[in-house]
Structure formats: C-alpha cells, structure tokens
Amino acid sequence: MKRRSFLLGSAAIAGTACLARASQGAATSIAHDLTIQPASYQFGAEPTQDLVSLSPDAPPPVIYGRQGVPLRLAVKNTLHDYTAMHWHGMRIENQMDGVPYLTQLPIGQDETFVYEFTPPDAGTYWYHPHCMTMSQMAHGLTGALIIEEANDPEFDADQVVNLRDFRINDDGSLLPSYTARGAARAGTFGNVQTANWQHSPSYDHPCGGLIRLRVLNTDTTRIYKLHLDTTDARIVAWDGHPVNIDLKLPSPDDPMLLGPGQRVDFAIKMPTREGQFVSLLAKFPGAPARAMTQLRSVGVDLKRDLHDLPALPQNPLAIPDLGAAQIHEFIFGWSPEGTAPNDGYCGSLGYTFWSINRTPWLGDAVEGTGPLATLDYGRSYILRLRNESPNLHPIHLHGLAFVPLRSNLRNLPPLFTDTLLLLKDEVVDIALVADNPGDWAFHCHVIEHQKTGLAGYIRVA
C-alpha cells in the first residue's frame, strides 16, 4: 500500500474509543456486552472490507475493569467461523481463559459465551481470539483491556496506544494473512503499521501534566523497536505489573524491544508550552525512526513533577522459593519431519514448522495430547526456556505470572511478566509459583509459529 494514500491520523475517535469506565470507588460489578462482527475501515483511499472488530466501522474498543471488582463480559459471535476470546495476561479462573477445547468449547455463529471473573491484578492487558486466531487477529480483532487500580494513581490523563500491522493492497483489499515462507521464519509482516488503526495519530493532553502512556503490541508478528523523544519520563509498569526498580529509558541507539503480546506503561511529563509534542517512535528495517503516535500539550501548565507520582501499588503476586524450586526444561525449535496438523474447528495453516521439546502442537482437539509438564499446586518452579532456532519467539504463558532469573546473552531485570521475548540462541531461566490450577496454554505469540507447532500447555494440579 502506497504511503501517500494512507490517511494521516489526528485526535480521532479510534484512539480514544472505550467501553465506559465505572466511577472511582462506585462499582460493585462491571458488565460489557461485546459482539464479534464483520467490519470495514478506511485506512487509505479505499475502504478495507473483511475486517473483524467489536464495531462495524471502528477498531475494537478499550475495555475497562477494576482490580477486585467482578467483571462480566458477554461475547456474542456473529461470524461464520468459530471463535473464543482470551484475556491476555489475566490471572483468572481456568474456565474463563478462552482457549478452545482446553478451557471451553468454541463459540459458534450467533452463540454467546459469558466470561465472568474478578481481576486480581491492575494494569495493562489485552484481548484477542484464540480460535481461528491467525485470520481473526490479522483482520483486526485485538484490543486493550485496562484494569484500573483500586485507588487513583494520580495521573492527569491516560493514553492507550495499540500497535499493530495490517496487510493491505492499494485497492484497500486485504492481502493473505500469512505465507508459508513467513511462518517458517520470522513471520509474515504487514505493510501498513498503525497505532490505534491510524498513521501517527496525535492526542491532546494537558501542558505540564503527568500522562500514563500504555503501549501494547497486539501484532501477529512484528517486534517493535521503540523509544521516546523525551527524557522527562520513566517506565512504571511492564506487562501489566508495576515496576519497582529504576529502568533505563530506551533511546535511538538502544531502543526497547516490544514483542507481540508485550506491554509497557510510561509516566510522561508533558511539555509546559501549548503545541509542543512528545512522540513515541519506532525503527523499521531500512528506514529512519518514525513517530507511531504523538502527545500534544494543550491548555494551562499544570506544573506537575514526576516525583509527584506515588508508586503504583504492587499486584498480589506470590514470590517463588528458589531454594525449593524444581526445574523443567523446554526447547523451542524446528518441527520433526512428517508431522501433519489437524484442521479442526479453529483452523490450521496447513503445515507444521515448529515444536516444543521436539513435539509440534498438531491443533485443537487432537486426542491424546498431554501437558508439556505437570506442576503441583502451590509449589515453586524454574522453567528453563531454550531457543534452538535463529528466530525470536515471544513466549506467553497463560494464567500465571513469572519472573526472569538469568539469561546466557543479556541482563534481564527481575520484572514479573506473562510474555518473554526469547532471542536467537538464548537460554533463560524463569521462576514462578504454580498458584492457579488448570491447563494453561504455553506458546509463541508470533501467531504463525503458534499455529504451525510452537504451542502446548502446562498443567497445574
């Protein structure tokens, strides 16, 4: 798609659309009705049809809940294809996790599944389908799920930025979501890079105010290299959980790698003069860094200071007992030859390229597929993640939070997470407490890798 034909964003509705937030301290429960439906949207000169959203003509909205407050999400499917909705990063009951055949049956056309859970953690999370995952995600069905703190964290404004690609022809039609060549390598990249479905949108925020910038990578493939063009900022949360150590801000020479499924929250002090900007920039291969989104200062100077912010309250995460932890090893690499996937109701790409522990995931509802490991409820574990491929893999574990301990290639800060970007030839030890019973999906979040074998599940019993 030609760059000149791409619509330039401003402070458009797509960047701020959300499902209503409950008044602080007033909600006893929060409910949202969500309808998965065909959609169209004008990215360029011609509208793009065959998208999937929770709105017929807009991106999936930001969904808001609150820590400790029951959340009810009624998901109706109007598509011909089956679907199921996963709440990425949420430590909730297994039957609410949204993985077909592992935690629920797929949702058929005109059927509704009601997800009900009480979020134990505040932070930045997201949602996407886990059935027909490749086609529905690539066609747009990825959105932010914000769980607000029980008490006001004292920001002046909050901005969600959902980064993702689309694959679009000059006439507005969608290109194929994946290629066999891409699936066997780093994935198939989009040619239209968006923030909240726009090209470099700009959002107004108060001069001198403190802004919480929530950045999500909901792409099926792309690993973003990000930095801000200000140093008047700090990282306050990583993959939903508050950061309680000083982290170096990313820079043009040392950008942050944000893999599919990962999130980062920045606290930013806005410029004090009206009309000045703060930009979130991304570096793409063979091109200079460009602004994915901009924050524009407006109004009277609030004269805030980053030191005004109280520390975000820590989420109730169990600390692993490393002295008593048992080790399990997982090898991520190529698929053995001669394996064929099961198409099932939730789709397959038609081939296998990848595996965990030399065994590819052959698709949903395959009989006789057991867990990669069984963990005893309440015990601490160290999982050794070994990448024996030349490609990077954002490894996501459902239902649990873990903390990296050590890497053979780099220093990793000890931040709780649910998704770890595993580098080429890297071996990383992570630690967790198996404190959430159930069968939990464990897979690469490059969706082409997941759907061609790099998936499985871990049982907590």
Image (cartoon, grey):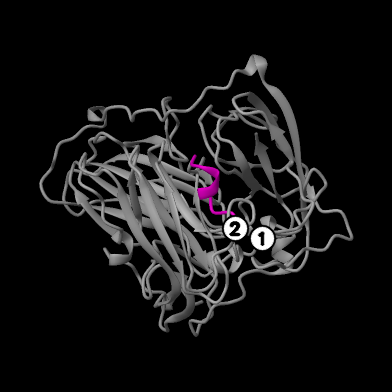
Residue located beneath label 1 in the image: 448
- Structural distance between the alpha carbons of marks 1 and 2: 8 Å
Mark 1 falls on what kind of element?
Answer: helix
378 to the left or right of 340: left
Residue 99 painted magenta:
yes
What percent of the width, then of the height, locates residue 289?
Answer: 47, 55
Residue 199 visible in rendering? no
Q: Eyeballing the image, is 177 above or below 440?
A: below
Mark 2 falls on what kind of element?
Answer: loop
Residue located beneath label 2 in the image: 221
The stretch of residues the image draws in magenta is 91-100
**Which mark's residue is nearer the viewer, 1 or 2?**
1
Say which residue appears at 58% left-offset and 77% top-offset. Answer: 175
Determine crowd level at label 1: few under 14, some 14-19, many 20+ residues with C-alpha closer than 10 A: many
What percent of the width, then of the height, locates residue 40?
Answer: 42, 78
Amino acid at circle 1: Glu
Q: Are marks 1 and 2 in contact (CB under 8 Å)?
A: yes
Amino acid at circle 2: Thr
